[in-house]
Amino acid sequence: MRNSRMPARIFIITGQTGAGKTTYAIDLAAKTGAIRFSIDDWMKALFWMDSPSPPDIDWSMARIARCEHQIQQQIRQLAERDISSVLDLGFTQAEHRNAFARFAGQIDCPAELHWIDIGKEERWRRVQQRNREKGVSFAMEVNEDMFAFMEGRWEAPCDKEMKWLEGKRIR
C-alpha cells in the first residue's frame, strides 16, 4: 500500500567507463532521497575476493545477474513504499537498460534515464586519476585493455529510448 510521499521513480544511470556515473548517482540519491544501488559495491562485497585470475567475463556476468536479481527485489519493496531507486549498474547496452525499464513498468514505477555523456579523452583521464587516488568511486583498477573492451560494448541511447524513458543527457 502506497503512502502520501512523492511517487517512487527508478533512475537508470548510463554512460561509458569514466563518465562519472557513480559520482552522479551518489549526488542524485542524496538530492532525491532515493536509495542508490551500485553493482560495483555489490560485486566488491560479495564476489571480487573470490574472482579468478585472469578475470573471466562469464564468471563475472553470472554473479552480476545474481546481484541484479536481488537488487530488483529490493527495488520492488522500496517502490511499494514510494521510495525511489538510483541504479548505478553500468547499463552499457540498450537491452540491459530496457530490461530494467520493463521491470519498472511491471511494478508500476516510472523509469527515468540519465545519460552522462563525456568525451573519451576526459573519461580516460578520470579513470587514470581514479586508479591512482582510489577514492569513493574506486571499485577496481581499470587498465587500458579493460577500458578499450568496454568502449567496444557501449551502445548509446537512441532517440526512441530517450523519449520512452524521459531521458536526460548530461554533459
Image: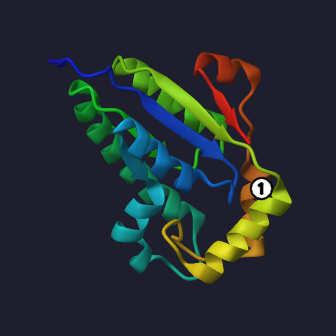
Q: Position of residue 98 (x, y in %)?
A: 56, 29
Using the image, determine if residue 24 lies above or below residue 86: below
- Depth check, front residue: 68 or 90: 90
Is residue 105 shown above or below 123? above
Secondary element type, mark 1: helix
Q: Where 75 sits versus 63, above or below?
A: above
Q: Position of residue 168 (x, y in %)?
A: 64, 29
Give the quarter of the image for residue 74. top left
Q: Is residue 87 left or right of residue 150?
A: left
Name the quadrant containing residue 167.
top right
Give the residue drawn at x 63%, y 55%. Answer: 20
Q: Residue furthest front?
A: 31
Q: Label 1: few (<14), some or many (≥20) within 10 Å?
A: some
Note whether residue 75 is visible: yes
Q: Nearer the viewer, residue 168 or 73?
A: 168
Count of marks, rendered view: 1
Viewer-closest of 164 and 169: 169
Q: Amino acid at mark 1?
A: Glu
Q: Quadrant of the N terminus?
A: top left
Q: Residue at x 20, y 17 (%)?
A: 4
| Residue 29 appears left or right of 127 | left
**Would you name the residue on which mark 1 appears?**
151
Residue 11 at what x, y percent from top left?
48, 34
Q: Is residue 49 left or right of residue 115?
A: left
Residue at the (17%, 19%) spot, across then down: 3
Q: Quadrant of residue 58?
A: bottom right
Identified at 44% across, 54% down, the residue is 38
